[in-house]
Amino acid sequence: MCPANMEKSVTYSSTRGEESQKGLDFRTVVMTGLAHDRGLFVPDSLPQVTPEELQSWRSLSYPDLAVKVISKFVKDDQVPLDVLTDIVTRSCAAFRSEDVTPVVDVGGHAILELFHGPTFAFKDVALQMLGNFFEYFLSTGSNGGRLTVLGATSGDTGSAAIYGLRGKKGVDCVILFPNGRVSEIQERQMTTVPDSNIHCVAVEGTFDDCQDLVKASFNDKEFRDRVKLGAVNSINWCRVLAQTTYYYWSYMRVTDNHQDVSEVSFSVPTGNFGDILAGYYAKQMGLPVGKLIVATNENDILHRFFSKGEYHRETIAHTISPSMDICVSSNFERYLFHLAGNDSATLSKWMTDFETSRKLTISGDLLKQAQSDFLSARCDTKETLRVIKEYSDKSGYVLCPHAATGVSAIHQLKEVSPSMVCLATAHEAKFPAAVKRAVDPLPTPPLQLSELFHKETRRSECPNDLKVVQAFVEKKIAIRIAEEAAANGGSLEKQLKRSIIAAAIIGAIAVGMQVFKRR
């Protein structure tokens, strides 16, 4: 029991509005991931940050600033402050820069370098923290100490999740990625990790197919409960919350360097909408944010929405910025919920209609509101390469293909200024084949990336079939449990046989039930 006078943490409810999914605590939403009514968790209230608080935070280190921001949502009733401080500090210690996410001035605007973590991508910021939150919650009673993380990746989430969860006690991490649709380095970052709790699965299909498999698994109650399913994709609220911290950090650094700047704007390479959504929430909390720019590649469903009100699903184009090769942005539902006036009935109808027709169209005041919240721009491959070459030639700064879309957007929209921050979401060395089309010779890659080509890899392959993927997950869990039991004095052969047989029986029953239901 918490003392009656203890300050309470923010609670969360699903965008779809089911009563059982309302008013849930931080621990529950982090461990649950996707709401059980197929919605996403959003905060029931947004804490406010005053100008005085912002000023008092100015001299803080990144970890200390992050604790201040996160503790606005997470109080001692969920995570004691000393534990929260330890989680954030250990997470930030994994970064190569003391600033964690340094801000540099290039070409008349700022660039927020989000690639100094273990996997050289922005997702390290959130996934180092999420892995440590999982570890704390499991060690203090959640899920009976076991969790199966099932995630989908278009390139960067997978390796960041793996590096955040490798070796974690009680955690199995299964990452699905589209076969042949991530860069070679992105795949090697995943498949060279030898820890026995890590399982990389190449799926025949696109990222959207992988994401659909993950969502379908969360919507399968029997499977979800049986394997104790958890999420690392940005459907997990913890991801979005952790990412708000670098908006505060970059605001401080820009206004330190340019004291005449009162508001800071951001241009964000956007696929699943989680990164820019964190900026939207930071703005709603009171951070002086000017404009938020959604930058897309040829997979431009978000640009079409903000320019014409058309959120219409189309076929995925395979581009040189693979982490943005997404046609359905899983985090976008959170923003649509707020656009609908936080009305779950309206949101649910929109999503149901979209799932049926593959189209959602808005107009009038709703479109005006959306356009006041976000600007947008589209950047194709030719333009991406042009921007990479121009910045290399003129500034000696090499952008990755994703960051280049954000830089292109501010030039297209004539928003270049010292108060504009472009998010550099990954290190250019992760995409040598693409960057070499604009910059030759390439800069020397970091040793951590070049040495990947000398390591052994291991991966599994699965068809785009829900039951096959679920059976794979259960088999891997069974093997791990048997190995743990053997380490505690049992016979590995016997334990493996029992566990795999049990998993096979459970899988067969599940398939049989599905067939029966269809009949």
Image (cartoon, rainbow, N blue to C red):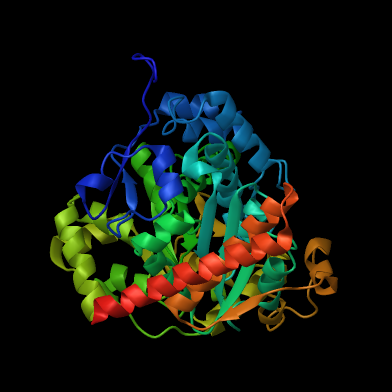
Left or right of residue 362, residue 374 in this image: right
Total labels: the figure holds: 0
Left or right of residue 357, residue 67 in this image: right
Seen from the viewer's position, the closer of residues 182 and 407 is 182
**Relative to 285, does residue 404 appear above or below in the rendering?**
below
The residue at 67%/75% (across/down) is 459
Instruction: Identify the image quadrant of residue 289.
Output: top left
Residue 113, percent across and down? Answer: 63, 54
**Relative to 292, does residue 47 appear above or below in the rendering?**
above
Residue 43 visible in the shown view: yes
Seen from the viewer's position, the closer of residues 124 and 41 is 41
Residue 111, percent across and down? Answer: 60, 55
The residue at 29%/37% (across/down) is 45
Seen from the viewer's position, the closer of residues 263 and 127 is 127
Residue 216, percent across and down? Answer: 37, 69
Pick the quarter of the image with the C terminus.
bottom left
Residue 156 visible in the shown view: no
Instruction: Identify the image quadrant of residue 60.
Output: top right
**Relative to 314, does residue 116 appear above or below in the rendering?**
above
Pick the quarter of the image with the N terminus.
top left
Left or right of residue 279, residue 92 in this image: right
Residue 366, percent across and down? Answer: 18, 61
The residue at 59%/47% (across/down) is 131
